[in-house]
Amino acid sequence: MGIPTLLFACMLLGTSSAQRLVTVQSGPLVRTEGSHVTIWCNVTGHKAGVEQDFEWSMYLHAAPTREIRIVSTSQPNFAYSVFAQRVNRKEIYVERLSSDSALLHITKLEAKDEGEFECYTPNTDGPYLGSYSAKTNLTVIPDTLSVTSAGQTLDKVEGEMLQLSCEVSRQTAQHTHLSLGWYLRSPDQSAPPQDLVTLSRDFVLRAGGPYKQRFNSGDLRLDKVSSATYRLTIYRVQPADQGLIYCEAAEWIQDPDRSWYAMTRKQSEKTTVKVQPTDRDFSIQVTTERRAYMAGEPLELRCSIDAQNVGDRYFSLSWVFSSSPVAVVGPSAVPVLSGDYVEREATGQMTVRKETPSVHLLKLQRLRPEDAGKYICRVTEREKTPTGDFVDRTKRSSNVQITVQPLKSNITVSLSSNSSEVPEGDSIQLTCSVRATTDKAGGLSVSWQWADKQGGAPQDLAAVDREGTVRPGPSYRERGSYGEVRAERVRPDTFTLTLLHALPTDEGQYTCTVTEWVQAPDRSWEKIGEKSAVKSVTVKTVESSFFVSASSRTPSVTYGDSFDLQCIVKPRHNPRVPVAVTWRFQPTEGAGGEGGAEFRDVVTLTREGTLRWGDQPLAASVRASVDRSSTNSNFRLSVTRAGRREGGTYQCSAQLWRRNYDSTWSKVANRTSNLLGINVQKPVSKLRVDKTNQSLWFVEDSRVRVNCSISSQTSPDSWHTVLWYARKGAEPVDGAELLLKISHSSGFEYGTYAEEERLKSRVQSERLSPRLYGLTLHQAETSDSGTYYCQVEEWLLDPDGAWYLLSQDSSGFTQVVVSQPEVRLQVEEVESNITVQDSGSIRLGCSIPSQSSKDSRFSVSWYVARAGGEGGDGAEGGEEAERQCVFSIGHDAVFGNGNCSPDEAPGPDSRLRFERPTSDLYSLTIQGARPADAGSYYCHVEEWLLNPRNAWYRLATNNSGVTIVNVLERASTLQSVVCSNDSLFYFVFFYPFPIFGILLIAVLLVRYKARSSSKNQEGKNGAPLLWIKEPHLNYSPTCLEPPALSLHPGSVE
């Protein structure tokens, strides 16, 4: 039983889990083009408390699979371009009804909006479970509803009948219902329209609230007189029916959810209905702000007519004062005045006008005492009777009693200043404000007085009369002529007094006295009173707060740095009380001045704001400037490139000047600041030279390069003096001598080492980069071996243009070893054996496959070793072989200038022939070999090089392999015998030729004759019996080979 129960509980749990469900308004929805459409979308089954987002898209019927995004509650740029502009203009938007419900609004439906709409809600629950979107179809049809009613204006009398007709038609193919209603809008446009009578879509007639009783009694009817015509009938109109009457129709369609929707709603033109009530009574009333006035004040009386349709009735009005007519205003609103009111109206002192159809105004601009009394308004209405006669009905208002009190001064005066304590040089501005109940325009004058605080007699400053003319007082007339005293009337009730550039003597009590005047009707002025106000003003002298102090943030600077000296002068700058500031300087001992030197002026900022430099300025880089704030002035002295001359004691002095109103100057005070010491030091050196030790090996005649690298320097503008030192290998470091010096000014100087070692012509120093220097030894010699290092001096240019040595540092040691080239001389050592005939040629070769240097030159000698001599005295045959020089050529290509002297002197008759076919091959030929030339031959090669001092030295020697030469002696032969005898030689080789020629000619003649005698005589084989070929004779024109005469086979057959 436990397992089934568990399975049943799991099934219940699975079925009770929530699934998301999105529902949308069911379709298809049929809506008219141009109407406002809404589609709702709800989502359920989501996690509680999480607000859902809605995304609307649509699918056109022509492309049902292509999504077109419209609007989203979470993505502002969700819409595609076809809907983007309408979404941005809020023509399409989403209204959120709750956290899980929303409403899509399309304010103006278009035909292209027809399609399938989809509402999608993004997942907010983690796992996907349920449905997340729903779709509905929207059909857009044309708006064919037409509502027509002719607009007109109808004047009705209360109790008459009113009938209006309205044409309503539609051309909709769908099944729709119509609703229609008549509405009344009162002349007050702000009030909502009232329902007269309506016909619902279910064909139910209903009357509006105020008209239910009249509808039930039959006084109000709505009839359908044709298929499209609806008529409104009011049998007895009432004044409440007055206004704008129009009909409104709506076309309804039933949605799939069985609810009805108004697809479109339209109104007809409005008919203006005016209803004249039968009650023609009216009432009048006169109103005013108050009943008691002062003379000169304006009086406004308004007469209001309370009646129906005042604008459509004819009223005339008359104003009466104490039973005397004042003015009459007829229906045309043109006033007609009486008595002296005509003149008052002409001069603008009186106004009579019709403000509205029911309100008339009487205004007296300036009341007079005689204007006090009773005022009434009398109104007469003229009506036309049905018989055509006119009847006048007149009514009068109640009396309005107006009292006018004579004029008296009722002003109050207040005096204020810009400050109760004014700094010297600033402006004192006093403002005298007047408040009164009468018109003050042109009727006030003011006078200004000053008195000291000890109670002395007041002095007149200035006065301003009624017309605004200013008259300065006698004591201030001169000062006022310079514009220092100004009295103005800025407003009709406000007067100001300004004393520019206040002086200490301006301190005291100031009095403002205002006199009030009134102008009588005869244009004369009458004084009606005066009031005064007093204000004490204190002038704070500049001298009392005059203070000078000097300061600097950098009391100690290095060469080339900048420092600022500040001279703070309090109080703040005042152009009328300016300050002249002078910076003074006392140099330090040894810094361009003697001990105890006096202060001298560096620069002065005059009171006019110009700079005046002293006779001995510090440097061209000194600059003076002024910074002013609300509390003080900072006179700054800036030195941009400080040097030794700028070190010392500084002090600033200030003089306070006062500018008088007549442009003269008066010296007020003099202050001196504290002493300020500035110490200018050399900068801390950052010079570092690379101290790496190294060893370099070079071959003689090479170019030796030693570098001196500066890893860091104090300033980018540093210049360097480089000293190169050298010492022999075994000498101590202290024994190093100066080789070369390159100064920071590019000066070049040789040291003793260069002179002793004769290095001037071979040594070179250059600046490879701003921090790399090189020493080059050209055509290095073995004597150049040793230790080299550089010493760098760092020089800087001080701001005065003088060079100073800051520091020095040495590099590491470079061990230079210069040796001769490595011996690579090789001579071919192959041994050979040559046998030649007597008188033949002996060719001896000497090949050098390897040499030590490409510039090497060679001295080549050939030697021969023979057996001991064959002396006739019977020398011993066992004597050792002796070496004999055959040929030699020196490294300078001179024959016989080698390492031996040959026995046979060179010359044209010499048997020796020397050749050098290639640079590494030498050849010697011995012509006319003799038996005595036999022996063992070899070549001896010496390799020579030219040292850097142009002296040749022998670098290496080597011998080639031995070539054994044998010479064979030749025996006597016929050839040698013939060649040795001239007569025999000619007999054998030249004389036989003529003889053979004669014999050949004879043979040819015989043969020719034989052919002539018998052409057919032939041999037995068909060939001639005798055939003789031309004999071949081989001979040599020399005596080396004897001539040979040979007959080839087949010459004779």
Image (cartoon, helix red, strand yellow):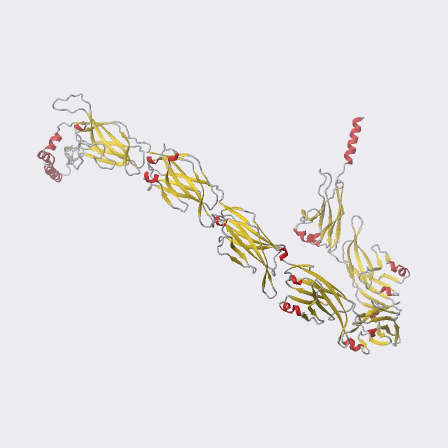
| Residue 815 visible in the shown view | no
| Residue 122 visible in the shown view | yes
User: Relative to residue 551, is residue 388 drawn left or right?
Assistant: right
Near-viewer residue (290 or 945): 290
Near-viewer residue (977 or 941): 941
Quarter placement of the N terminus: top right
Using the image, determine if residue 69 lies above or below residue 854. Answer: below
Q: Quadrant of residue 268?
A: bottom right
User: How far across and how far down the image is residue 600, in percent?
Assistant: 51, 54
Q: Quadrant of residue 753?
A: top left
What residue lies at 66% left-to-right and 63% top-to-bottom? 506
What residue lies at 19% left-to-right and 23% top-to-bottom? 880
Using the image, determine if residue 338 lies above or below residue 666. Answer: below
Using the image, determine if residue 737 lies above or below residue 309. Answer: above
User: How far across and how far down the image is residue 143, in percent?
Assistant: 74, 57
How many marks overall?
A: 0
Near-viewer residue (270 or 996): 270
In the image, farthest residue toward the right? 217
User: Relative to residue 666, is residue 85 drawn left or right?
Assistant: right
User: How far across and how far down the image is residue 464, in percent?
Assistant: 70, 70
Near-viewer residue (405 or 832): 405
What residue lies at 84% left-to-right and 63% top-to-bottom? 231
Q: Quadrant of residue 748?
A: top left
User: How far across and how far down the image is residue 330, in percent?
Assistant: 82, 75
In the image, farthest residue toward the left? 983
